[in-house]
Amino acid sequence: MKKGIILVNSYYDLPAYLNQAYRLREELSRIGITADIVTSDKPGLFIYDGKITLPGGLPDFCIYYDKDKYLSEMLEKAGVRLFNPHAAISVCDDKTTTLVALAGHGIPMPDTVSGLLCFTPEKQVSKEMLDNIEKTLGYPLIAKESFGSLGKGVYKIDDRGKLERIAEKLKTKPHLYQKYIASSYGRDMRVIVVGGRTVAAMTRRSNGDFRSNIELGGKGEKLDADENLKALSEKVARLLNLDYCGIDWLFGENDEPVLCEVNSNAFFGGIESVTGVNVAKAYAEHVAKTVYGK
């Protein structure tokens, strides 16, 4: 019997998030594969006698819709094939690590300064660091928390005063600073790559916010991705070893793509609605081919 699991976080019940699991279960069922939706508190993984144990035996695969890097690593080490692999999830979950992994591979990205981590909260933010950020990036600039999604933890900074305030707010969290891409204000491109192939793309536009996330009120429109955008998106997925991802591109000079971020478990409900592409089907078929050879 062909059987896997779709693992979702026990504490996260956003409808768009849960829709991912239901849609994938439906499409897997259509090709003869049973997949139970399992919350992250259910596997019961533990280390016993120096070995990782999974009560009830191993599923054929796990589509992993969580960001708990410990659980994903334990599942993978126990012998479960994860979609996406543990290392890919870990890299994409950290925006700074994503950029470091892609640097030097010809992927266009904004100039970036990594924020210094402060382990002593009462210490003041380094003036030299702030001077370097100003000199390197200019104003306005963007600050991002390294861990976050749906546009949360992203700040537009217009002057030294706000830079000082945001730097103080973020100093104990992993974060980064980037050059502001003015030509992409309120708009970007989302590209979905499955199994190394571009399957859907859309533009997203906001009404008055520099972020264009649909979850923040942005509107999507089908995009016929050109060969350059497809090639760049597929290269990013290949470099990060992703089975599935949503890659967000900013509009750079002459509308050339500039990397914003990579989402290893990007929502696909919006892009399915906008483009008419059955992303869940493409993902289910990739899982079937990878695990069962068809």
Image (tube, rainbow, N blue to C red):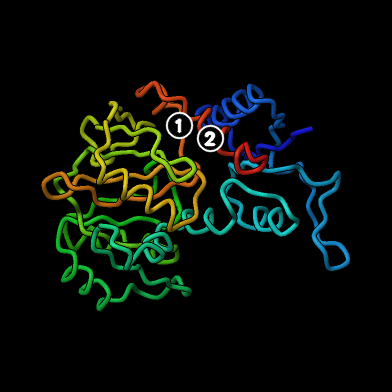
Give percent across and percent down for residue 245: 45, 44
Q: Three-letter amino acid code at disc 1?
A: Phe
Q: Which residue is mark 1?
A: 268
Front residue (pair 65, 176): 65
Residue 171 placement: quadrant: bottom left
Residue shown at the point (59%, 29%) measured from the top left: 24
Q: Quadrant of the N terminus?
A: top right
Answer yes or no: do the residues labelled 2 and 1 have beta carbons within 8 Å?
yes
As drawn, 221 above or below 10: above
Give percent across and percent down for residue 4: 71, 37
Helix, strand or loop at mark 1: loop
- Mark 1: give few (<14), some (14-19) or many (20+) Cα within 10 Å: many
Q: Which residue is mark 2?
A: 283
Give percent across and percent down for residue 184: 19, 43
Residue shown at the point (34%, 68%) measured from the top left: 114
Residue 9 visible, this orientation: no
Residue shown at the point (46%, 39%) measured from the top left: 266
Q: Three-letter amino acid code at disc 2?
A: Tyr
Q: Residue furthest left?
A: 254
As drawn, 132 above or below 184: below
Residue shown at the point (26%, 40%) measured from the top left: 188
The mark tally for this picture is: 2
